[in-house]
Each structure stands twice: as structure tokens, then as C-alpha cells.
Amino acid sequence: MSFFKEIKEQRQQKKEAKKQELRKKNAELRKQGKDPLKGWGQMMDTGAGGFNKANPIDTKVYFGEKQKRIALEAQHKKQQRETKMSDE
């Protein structure tokens, strides 16, 4: 056998072993009354969906505005701390 055929066969055997291990694990979960293919449940709607289909310019503006808002909040908190320190 050539070197590449041996490697290919080894990889195939490794994949089969992994499949069998997963089947065994799933069978154990089914014995416990759990569904191994259930997943985590429904996804939560964050209201920020559709970024993958959005225009890149729109998402850049969104994140830019968000960063500006965070910077303003940080500046406001800093000013509050400074005034609080000067009052004491």
C-alpha cells in the first residue's frame, strides 16, 4: 500500500470509531430519557437580527454610533466622579 492510501484508511477508521462512540453516547442518553438531538432550545430574539444580510455601511454606522454612546456615558460617569470628589 502506498503512504497516502494508508493515511486515508487510518483517517477513515478514526472517523468510524468516532461515529461509533457518538452512537454509544446517544444510546446512553436515550436510555436516560433524554433526546441527544434536541439542542439548546429556541433562539432568543435580540432585535439585532439580519446583520449578515445588511449593508456593511449600515452595520458600520450602527457600531460607530454605539461606540460614541459608550464614550459619552463613560465621559459622563467620569465627570460625576470628579464633581463628587470636589464636593467632598
Image (cartoon, rainbow, N blue to C red):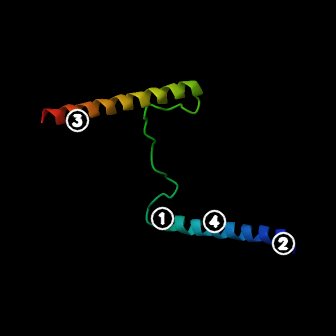
Please give the label number shown on residue 19. Answer: 4
Numbered mark located on residue 29 in the image? 1
| Image coords of residue 76 (percent x, y) | 29, 29
Q: Which amino acid does label 4 sit on?
A: Lys
Q: Could you tell me how far apart the alpha carbons at marks 3 and 1 are, in whole angstroms?
A: 55 Å
- The crowd level at tag 4 (other Cα within 10 Å; few <14, some 14-19, many 20+) is few
Residue at 71% over, 71% down = 13
Q: Marks 4 and 3, how far apart in space? A: 59 Å
Give the number of the mark in front: 4 or 2: 2
Residue 76 located left or right of residue 25:
left
Do the residues bearing badges 2 and 1 touch, measured as CB atoms within 8 Å?
A: no
Whether residue 59 is situated above or below residue 1 in the rendered picture:
above
The label nearer to you, 2 versus 3, is 3
The disc at residue 81 is 3
The answer to whether residue 13 is above or below residue 61 is below
Question: Whole-percent x and y of residue 9?
Answer: 78, 70
Amino acid marked by disc 1: Leu
Find disc 2 in the rendering and name its residue: 3
